Image (cartoon, helix red, strand yellow):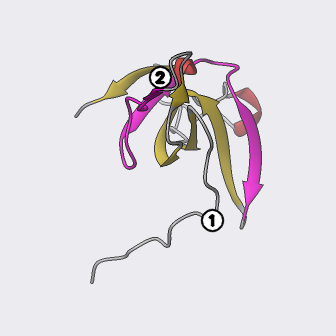
């Protein structure tokens, strides 16, 4: 049976993007799993919601380059973290997204 996640009740504005950070299991070269306290902040996540885009001086709206469901890499200390329904989220500006991960 396919599990469908309910849409998040947060709608970003302007060029902001809602990202759900993806935790990676980190291991040393010898195979030891690192505890959470030794891990760095994740810099990869799944786009959960996207704002309508930034309005430029001419009044035209520039659409955001990422879309819901894409896996992205973002700057290490970017955005604002918050918790919603026991899930961690991050709101970043489009300019803090460094790349789209394609696998």
Q: Few, some or many C-alpha atoms within 10 Å of disc 1 (few <14, some 14-19, many ≥20)? A: few
Q: Residue at x 52, y 39 (%)?
A: 25
Magenta-drawn stretch contains 30: no
Q: Secondary structure at mark 1?
A: loop
Q: Residue at x 68, y 51 (%)?
A: 88
Residue 72 horizontal side relative to residue 94, left or right? left
Q: Position of residue 42 (x, y in %)?
A: 59, 31
**What label does residue 78 carry, if any?**
none
Separation (CA) of disc 2 from disc 1? 42 Å
Residue 65 lies, with reference to residue 9, above or below; the image says: above
Residue 40 appearing in the image: yes
Q: Position of residue 73 (x, y in %)?
A: 46, 25
Magenta-drawn stretch contains 80: yes
16 or 70: nearer the viewer: 16
Q: Which residue bears the numbered disc 1?
A: 9
Q: Secondary structure at mark 2?
A: loop
The mark nearer the N terminus, 2 or 1, is 1
Residue 81 horizontal side relative to residue 57, left or right? right
49 or 25: nearer the viewer: 49
Please report the bounds of the magenta region as a residue range.
60-84
40 or 98: nearer the viewer: 98
Q: Few, some or many C-alpha atoms within 10 Å of disc 2 (few <14, some 14-19, many ≥20)? A: few
Q: Quadrant of the C terminus?
A: top left
Q: Position of residue 95 (x, y in %)?
A: 54, 18
Residue 60 lies, with reference to residue 20, above or below; the image says: above
**What label does residue 30 carry, if any?**
2
Work out which residue is located at the far bottom of the displayed protein and give it: 1
Residue 43 horizontal side relative to residue 1, left or right? right
Q: Where is residue 71, by image quadrant? A: top left
Mark nearer the viewer, 2 or 1: 1
Q: Residue at x 50, y 34 (%)?
A: 53
């Amino acid at each position: 049976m396919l599990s469908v996640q309910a849409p998040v009740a947060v709608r970003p504005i302007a060029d902001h993007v809602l990202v759900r950070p993806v935790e990676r299991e980190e291991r040393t070269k010898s195979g030891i799993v690192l505890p959470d306290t030794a891990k760095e902040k994740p810099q990869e996540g799944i786009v959960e919601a996207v704002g309508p885009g930034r309005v430029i001086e001419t009044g035209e709206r520039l659409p955001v380059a990422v879309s819901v469901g894409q896996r992205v890499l973002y700057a290490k200390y970017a955005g604002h973290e918050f918790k919603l329904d026991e899930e961690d989220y991050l709101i970043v500006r489009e300019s803090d997204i460094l790349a789209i991960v394609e696998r």
